[in-house]
C-alpha cells in the first residue's frame, strides 16, 4: 500500500479477520459502507507481497482476476475503488491499461503482479476464465455470481507453477451485500432454509466445503420498535464496522425514503428481495399464488414442459393442468450450456419425477433457428432426445402478448381460488415473479424486461400459458395444447442418455 493515508483496520472486526485470513475461499458479507471491498483490495495487496520469489525471475510473481457481473459496474465501482488514493493509485503503482480486459500491472520492489479485471455479463465472457491461469480470484458482489462460475474458476488457480517455485497461496476472495433468498450463498450459509425435496447429490452441492470461511459483519442500523412491537424507526448500530472511515451522517442519509427490503438487505445485512424496477406482473402475490407445500405430480394428467433455450441460462418449467388449475411443480435452470447438454438433463428429470406420465413440450419459437456452429436447432436436439417441441403460439414472439398471457392467468381467480399455483420448489421463478423480473429502459428508450436467469424462467412461464390458451380470447391465437402427448419411459440406466 502507499505511504500516505492508508485504509484503516480496527482490531477485533470481521474486516480485520478477513484481511488476515489465509482460507482457500474467504467471503465477507456486510452492509453498505462497511469497508468490505476495500478490505478485499488490501487482502490482494497482502498476498501479492507475500508471494514466493521466483527461482527464474527473482521476483514475487502473481496473477489475479477481479470479477464483477457487468462491465459498467466493473468500471464505475470495482476499478474506481481499486484506484482510490488510499488503495492502489495509478500515481504510485503505474497506469491502468484500459484495453479489454482492463489490466493493472504492478511492479514495485521485487513484486511483479498482474491484476486483470473481468466482466462476465455475456455468453462468451464465461470462456474468459478458461483462457487464464490465476494465483487468486476476487469476486466483487458475489450475490450476482452463479455458483457454477465459482466452481469453474476454482480450477484455474495454478499460477505461478512449480517452475517458478510455486505460490505461497492460491485461493479466492469475495465481498457481497446480503444475497437474495434463492442465491446459493444464502442457502449454504444457513441464512435461508435448505430447499425441500433435494436429492442427495443436490444437497451435497449446498454443503459448506472445508477451507471456505464466511465473515458476517454486524448490521449498520438496528430497528427501533414501539410498545406494540411495530417498527417505528432505525438507529445506527454502535458495533457496526468502518464508521470511523465514513463521512458524518452517511447512514441517516442512506435511510431516507428507502423501502424496508432495501434497508434490510443493504443496511441490516439480512436476506431480503430488493426490486430495482417495476415488476412485470404486479398482480403476483406470493402468499396467494405460491403453495405452502411442494406440488406433487398428479396421475392421469399430462406433464407440460415449457422451454426457453437461452445459452447462458437455459430454462424449463414442469407443470400440469388439473381441474382447470395450472400447477407449476418444478423448475430447471442450466448455466452456460447449449441444447446438447440441457436436453438430456430435461429428459432425465422427466424420467426421475414423472415416470409413466404422458408429456408435451412447448418452447420459444426462436428455438427452431439453426445454431451458428451446427445445422441443428434446439428443436432438432430435443427431438433427437425423444422430446418433440411445439413452438408456443405467439405472433413474432411478441413480448407484450406473452406477458399478457401470464397476467391473464394470474388474474383469473374464480370464487377467490388461484387459477395458477406455483410450488415453493420453484424458488428462482418465484423470486423473478416477485420483482426480479422487472422492466428496465434500454438504449432505444423502450422499457423491456431485464434479461437474466429470472427472465428465462419467466419466459418459460409465458410459453406455458400461451400453449394452454391463456388469453387467447384477447389475442386471437389458438391453443397449442392439442399436440399429441408422448409417454415417459424410465430407462434402466441413466448412463444411456448422451448429449
Image (cartoon, grey):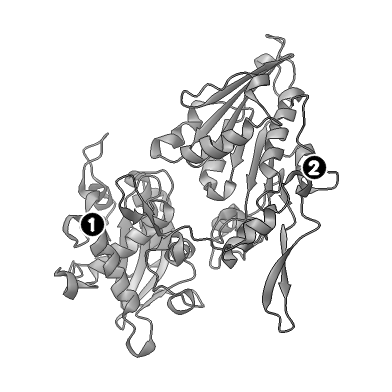
User: Can residue 492 be seen?
Assistant: no
Q: Mark 1 points at which residue?
A: 388
Q: In this view, does 247 lie to the left or right of 368?
A: right
Query: Of 188 and 197, which appears nearest the observer?
Result: 188
Residue 498: image x %, image y %? Answer: 36, 46
Q: Which residue is drawn at 33% across and 55% down?
A: 447
Residue 372: image x %, image y %? Answer: 25, 35
Residue 116: image x %, image y %? Answer: 56, 27
Query: Of 14 and 297, which appears nearest the observer?
Result: 14
Q: Is residue 300 left or right of residue 31?
A: left
Q: Is mark 1 on a helix, strand or loop?
A: loop
Q: In this view, does 303 lie to the left or right of 185?
A: left
Residue 435: image x %, image y %? Answer: 45, 63
Query: Of 2 and 45, which appears nearest the observer?
Result: 2
Quarter of the rendering occupied by the C terminus: top left
User: Can residue 233 be seen?
Assistant: yes
When asked about the image quadrant of residue 329, the answer is: bottom left
Q: Name the residue under label 2.
A: 16
Give me the C-alpha separation between circle 1 and circle 2.
57 Å
Amino acid at each position: 500500500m502507499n505511504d500516505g493515508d492508508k485504509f484503516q483496520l480496527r482490531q477485533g472486526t470481521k474486516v480485520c479477520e478477513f484481511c488476515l485470513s489465509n482460507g482457500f475461499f474467504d467471503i465477507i458479507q456486510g452492509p453498505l459502507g462497511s469497508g468490505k471491498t476495500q478490505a478485499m483490495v488490501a487482502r490482494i495487496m497482502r498476498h501479492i507481497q507475500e508471494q514466493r520469489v521466483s527461482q527464474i525471475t527473482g521476483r514475487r510473481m502473481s496473477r489475479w482476476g477481479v470479477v464483477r457481473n457487468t462491465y459498467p459496474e466493473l468500471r464505475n465501482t470495482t476499478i474506481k475503488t481499486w484506484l482510490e488514493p488510499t488503495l492502489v493509485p495509478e500515481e504510485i503503482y503505474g497506469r491502468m491499461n484500459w484495453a479489454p480486459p482492463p489490466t493493472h500491472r504492478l511492479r514495485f520492489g521485487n513484486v511483479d503482479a498482474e491484476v486483470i479485471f473481468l466482466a462476465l455479463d455475456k455468453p462468451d465472457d464465461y470462456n474468459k476464465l478458461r483462457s487464464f491461469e490465476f494465483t487468486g480470484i476476487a469476486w466483487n458482489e458475489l450475490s450476482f455470481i452463479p455458483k457454477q462460475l465459482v466452481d469453474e474458476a476454482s480450477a484455474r488457480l495454478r499460477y505461478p507453477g512449480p517452475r517458478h517455485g510455486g505460490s505461497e497461496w492460491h485461493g479466492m476472495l469475495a465481498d457481497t451485500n446480503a444475497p437474495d433468498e434463492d442465491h446459493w450463498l444464502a442457502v449454504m450459509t444457513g441464512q435461508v432454509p435448505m430447499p425441500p425435496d433435494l436429492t442427495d447429490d443436490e444437497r451435497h452441492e449446498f454443503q459448506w466445503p472445508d477451507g471456505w470461511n464466511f465473515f458476517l459483519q454486524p448490521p449498520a442500523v438496528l430497528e427501533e420498535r414501539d410498545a406494540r412491537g411495530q417498527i417505528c424507526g432505525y438507529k445506527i448500530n454502535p458495533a457496526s464496522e468502518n464508521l470511523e472511515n465514513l463521512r458524518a451522517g452517511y447512514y441517516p442519509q442512506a435511510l431516507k425514503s428507502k423501502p424496508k427490503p432495501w434497508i434490510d438487505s443493504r443496511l441490516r445485512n439480512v436476506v431480503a428481495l430488493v426490486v430495482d424496477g417495476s415488476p412485470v406482473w404486479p398482480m403476483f402475490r406470493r402468499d396467494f399464488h405460491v403453495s405452502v407445500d411442494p406440488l406433487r405430480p398428479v396421475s392421469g394428467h399430462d406433464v407440460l414442459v415449457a422451454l426457453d433455450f437461452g445459452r447462458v441460462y437455459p430454462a424449463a418449467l414442469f407443470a400440469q393442468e388439473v381441474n382447470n388449475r395450472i400447477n407449476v411443480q418444478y423448475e430447471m435452470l442450466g448455466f452456460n450450456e447449449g441444447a446438447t447438454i440441457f436436453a438430456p438433463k430435461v429428459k432425465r428429470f422427466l424420467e426421475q419425477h414423472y415416470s409413466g406420465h404422458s408429456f408435451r413440450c412447448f418452447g420459444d419459437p426462436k428455438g427452431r433457428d439453426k445454431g451458428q456452429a451446427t445445422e441443428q436447432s434446439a428443436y432438432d436436439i430435443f427431438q433427437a432426445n425423444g422430446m418433440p417441441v411445439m413452438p408456443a403460439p405467439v405472433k413474432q414472439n411478441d413480448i407484450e402478448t406473452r406477458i399478457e398471457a401470464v397476467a391473464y392467468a394470474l388474474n383469473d381467480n374464480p370464487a377467490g381460488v388461484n387459477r395458477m399455483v406455483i410450488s415453493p420448489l420453484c424458488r428462482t421463478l418465484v423470486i423473478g415473479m416477485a420483482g426480479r423480473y422487472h422492466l428496465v429502459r434500454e438504449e432505444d428508450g423502450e422499457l423491456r424486461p431485464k434479461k437474466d436467469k429470472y427472465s428465462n424462467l419467466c419466459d418459460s412461464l409465458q410459453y406455458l400459458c400461451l400453449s394452454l390458451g391463456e388469453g387467447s380470447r384477447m389475442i386471437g391465437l389458438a391453443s397449442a395444447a392439442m399436440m399429441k402427448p408422448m409417454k415417459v419411459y424410465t430407462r434402466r440406466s441413466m448412463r444411456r442418455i448422451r448429449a
